[in-house]
Amino acid sequence: MSGGPVLAIGIDLVEVDRIRSAHFRWGKCFLARIFTEKEIAHCLARQNPYPSLAARFAGKEAVAKALGSGFGREISFRSVEIFSDGGPPSVRLLPPASGRMVRLGGKDLLISLSHSGSLAIGQAILLG
């Protein structure tokens, strides 16, 4: 953590069944539109991938909110990657999302994910 001031906070709550239903309806196309290959591989390696997919979806939404834009022209779902290499989750921003963070004066982006039962939550904190 950089220890800089908090510039923005984003939070999002997602129903796990919403993600499961979208995957059943749209299949691989849904996953490929929302998640990076690394995220898909990480989640699908689990016995029940849907809580993890939903938490990452919520995390991506939280990041977009912390960056003050939501998803659209400047930020796509795949320009926000949430990964975990054995420790707590981290965020990797790809262009143009990374450029937006720089323009906002952001130096670090923290992410927290959780899921329980039918809900998943993500919170992002943009530090200056």
Image: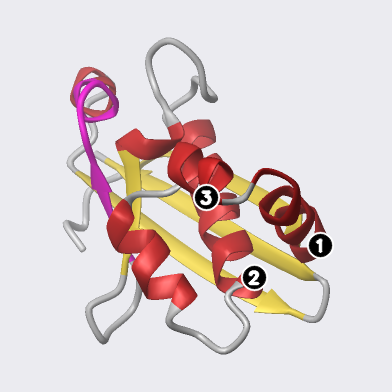
* Residue labelled with disc 1: 17
Q: Is residue 95 left or right of residue 8?
A: left
* Residue labelled with disc 3: 28
* Residue labelled with disc 2: 50
Task: Label 2, secondary structure: give it.
Answer: helix
Image location (x, y in percent) of residue 32 = 44, 44
For residue 37, the mark is: none
Colour basis: secondary structure
Is residue 102 shown in magenta?
no
- Nearest the viewer among 23 and 117 is 23
Q: CA distance from mark 2 to mark 1?
A: 8 Å
> What kind of residue is marked 2?
Tyr
Q: Are marks 2 and 1 in contact (CB under 8 Å)?
A: yes
Q: CA distance from mark 1 to mark 3?
A: 17 Å
* Label 3 environment density (alpha carbons within 10 Å; few <14, some 14–19, many ≥20): few
Magenta region? 90-99
Residue at 69% from the left image edge and 66% from the top image edge: 120
Q: Name the mark nearer the viewer: 3 or 2.
A: 3
Q: Which comes before the other along the chain, label 3 or label 2?
A: 3
* Label 1 environment density (alpha carbons within 10 Å; few <14, some 14–19, many ≥20): some
* Label 2 environment density (alpha carbons within 10 Å; few <14, some 14–19, many ≥20): many
Task: Label 1, secondary structure: give it.
Answer: helix
- Nearest the viewer among 59 and 105 is 59
Residue at 51% from the left image edge and 59% from the top image edge: 56
> What kind of residue is marked 1?
Asp
> What kind of residue is marked 3?
Lys
